[in-house]
Image: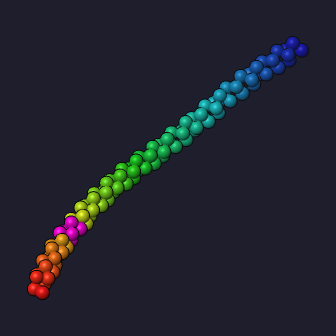
Amino acid sequence: MKKLLLLSTVFIVLTLFLSAFTGCQEESLTDTKKARFIGNENRKLKAQLAKCQADIENCLQQKQALQQKRADKTVKVMSFLVEQKRQLEEQNEQLKQQLEELKNRE
């Protein structure tokens, strides 16, 4: 009877020890898998972040180029308007002179 009790106790202790040891290994494997998964996700996210940053930089460069084009066109339009105003003022002055000449003839 004592032998049976002793063997049962040893068996129970061994079973508990082995189950605890096996449980740790499974958790360790699970932790390793989780760590790999997280590492892979981090790499993917870093790649996406780098791509987004490159896209943002590209957009900023395009914006700057468009702003420069707009500024150049504004300068051209303003120059055209200034020239048109100058020509109209000259024509106006000529017409005033012609009008004066016609008044003086009468």
Marker count (numbered): 0
Task: Assess whether residue 7 is covered by the magenta stretch.
Answer: no
From the viewer's perspective, is 27 left or right of 83? right
**Colouring style:** rainbow
**Residue at the image point whose x is 48% and y is 45% from the top:** 45
From the viewer's perspective, is 37 left or right of 49? right
**Residue at the image point whose x is 55% and y is 36% from the top:** 35
What stretch of residues is rendered in magenta? 81-87
Q: 26 or 46, which lies in front? A: 46
From the viewer's perspective, is 18 left or right of 28? right
**Residue at the image point whose x is 78% and y is 18% from the top:** 10
As drawn, the residue found furthest toward the right would be 1
Q: Position of residue 75 (x, y in %)?
A: 24, 61
Q: Position of residue 11 (x, y in %)?
A: 78, 21
Q: 8 or 74, which lies in front? A: 74
User: Which quadrant of the rendered structure holds the C terminus?
Assistant: bottom left
Q: Is residue 105 above or below residue 49?
A: below
**Residue at the image point whose x is 39% and y is 51% from the top:** 56
Q: Is residue 47 above or below residue 31?
A: below
Q: Position of residue 103 (x, y in %)?
A: 14, 82
Q: Is residue 45 above or below residue 71?
A: above
As drawn, the residue found furthest toward the front would be 106
Q: Position of residue 9 (x, y in %)?
A: 81, 17
Residue 69 appears in which quarter of the rendering?
A: bottom left
Q: Main secondary structure of the magenta part?
A: helix
